[in-house]
Amino acid sequence: MSAVAAEAVAAGAVTVGTVAVVAHRGKKLGGGLDELRTLVSGYGVDRIVWYEVAKSAKAPKKARKALKQGAELVFVWGGDGMVQRCADALAGSGATLAIVPAGTANMLASNLGIPRDLAAAVRIGFEGRRRALDLGKVNGEHFAVMAGAGFDGALIRDADRSLKDRAGRLAYVWTALRHVRDDPVRARIRVDGTTWFDGKASCVLLGNVGTITGGIRAFDDARLDDGWLEVGVATARGAVQWARTLGRMVAGRTARSPLVRITRAKAVDVKLRKPMTYELDGGARGPTTRLKVRIRPAAITVCVPADRYGHGSAAVPSTRS
């Protein structure tokens, strides 16, 4: 055990028997996966089960295999797509998720205050606070950050992977410019059993956090542990209206936009006039004409910085009714 790890254990850091790593081998951070293995093993864990995948779609199988191997703590190396796929597999299992943000956007990590620093991320995994977080579930699949269709779905679908690797978040900006003139689609949105919106929509967004792709503050009051989903619909059309809408979002005044409606719900049913691509946590799915969405309170436990949510490793008490 390293001196740092021994100090952490003496201070009351979480100790676990079996630790799993599920890593996207194409993502890079710090000294890479070799450094990750060194850092994790330095905490004196009894056993490490290690899985690498070439794409995030293969991660759920490895995460479930890690559970069968008795993993209590699962480090996920990659971007939001990897985290979403693994969170979907780990939901309700009792295992704890530790995020190593090696992706482009890293939206969940950013909302939780997990830095893009390898040693710091591993330290949070072992020494940070355990926080019970809600997950949304859309068409049978969990998401931690957001889901959406229309402008949002098209943006995620068309943000070329190689462009993201070269340009980072600017890839989303450039891709967005190609879709500001897309025609709105007729949508009917039911919120907790009542029709809330019926008209032409350019974007339907469901959020579990406040800050989304590109650092935009979409939902001012969103919380990851309040038992609610934020629901937004935009009716912006054309470059001028989208510029106004996005400008208000960047300024943190989304709810004041005349082209945006926002509410919150536990269950949302979206019906679209024509099939559209949808996305969850930055990964494209679809196309589909329906989104059936539910909130799953306290569905997963995630490691977060102790100094951001209080000290120690005890789970945060639920604030839900």
Image (cartoon, helix red, strand yellow):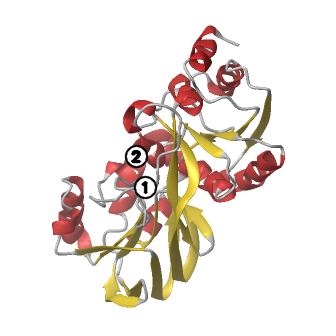
| Image location of residue 93, percent across then percent down | 69, 55
Any part of residue 245 in sight: yes
Q: Which residue is mark 2?
A: 111
Quadrant housing the C terminus: bottom left
Q: Is residue 281 visible?
A: no
- Dot 1 amino acid type: Leu
Q: Residue at x 43, y 43 (%)?
A: 112
Q: Whole-percent x and y of residue 211?
A: 35, 52
Q: Amino acid at mark 2?
A: Asn
Q: Is residue 90 above or below residue 27?
A: below
Foreground residue, 130 or 264? Answer: 130
> Does 46 sit left or right of 234 as displayed?
right
**CA–CA distance between discs 1 and 2?**
9 Å
Name the residue nearer the viewer: 84 or 48. 48
**Mark 2 or mark 1, which is nearer the start of the sequence?**
2
The residue shown at (24%, 59%) is 249
Q: In the structure shown, which secondary structural element does the residue marked by tag 1 occupy?
A: loop
Single out the mark in the foreground, 1 or 2. Answer: 1
Check the image and name the residue furthest to the top: 3
Q: Secondary structure at mark 2?
A: helix
Q: Are marks 1 and 2 in contact (CB under 8 Å)?
A: yes
Total of numbered circles in the picture? 2
Which residue is labeled 1 in the image?
224
The quadrant of the picture occupied by the N terminus is: top right
Say few, some or many: other residues with alpha carbon within 10 Å of mark 2 (under 14 / 14 to 19 / 20 or more). some
Q: Is 195 placed above or below 139 here?
A: below
